[in-house]
Amino acid sequence: MKTKDNLRNFDSLPNAASVDVQVVAALCGCSVSTAWDRSRRGALPKPRKIGGSARWNVGELRAVLTGAHA
């Protein structure tokens, strides 16, 4: 799926789905470099490498964005 589609359909993606840094940045209302920085500082979940690309788990992002993470 493309970034724009993932962003538009984020609410309907399963928790097990993964999205790229462009989607993470758009969801957080920040730049790509800020999204990476927030991930390094622990404010966002760490990405997983999938086929050489960094991807964030949708369920983990939802927990952070809704304030439900511990």
Image (tube, helix red, strand yellow):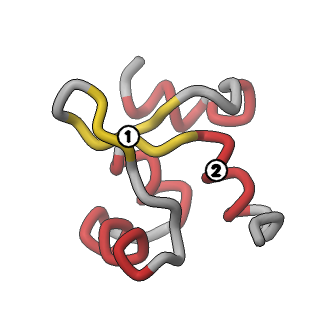
Q: Nearer the viewer, residue 9 or 14?
A: 14
Residue at image point 29% right, 39% down: 49
Mark 1 and 2 residues: CB-CB less than 8 Å, in contact? no
Spatial CA span between label 1 and label 2: 11 Å
- Give the residue at mark 2: 60
Type of the residue with mark 2: Glu
Quarter of the image where the N terminus is located: top left
| Residue at the bottom extreme, as displayed | 41
Quarter of the image where the C terminus is located: bottom right
Helix, strand or loop status at disc 1: strand
> For the image shown, how many numbered marks are present on the structure?
2
| Residue at the left extreme, as displayed | 52
Q: Is residue 61 above or below residue 12?
A: below
Residue 5 tag number? none
Residue at image point 68% right, 64% down: 64
Q: Is residue 21 above or below residue 52?
A: below
Binning the other alpha carbons within 10 Å of mark 1 as few (below 14), some (14 to 19) or many (20 upward) gives some
Type of the residue with mark 1: Arg
Helix, strand or loop status at disc 2: helix
Answer with left or right where residue 63 lies relative to residue 5: right
Quadrant of the image occupied by residue 65: bottom right
Q: Indicate the position of residue 17 as horizontal and vertical percent values.
A: 56, 27
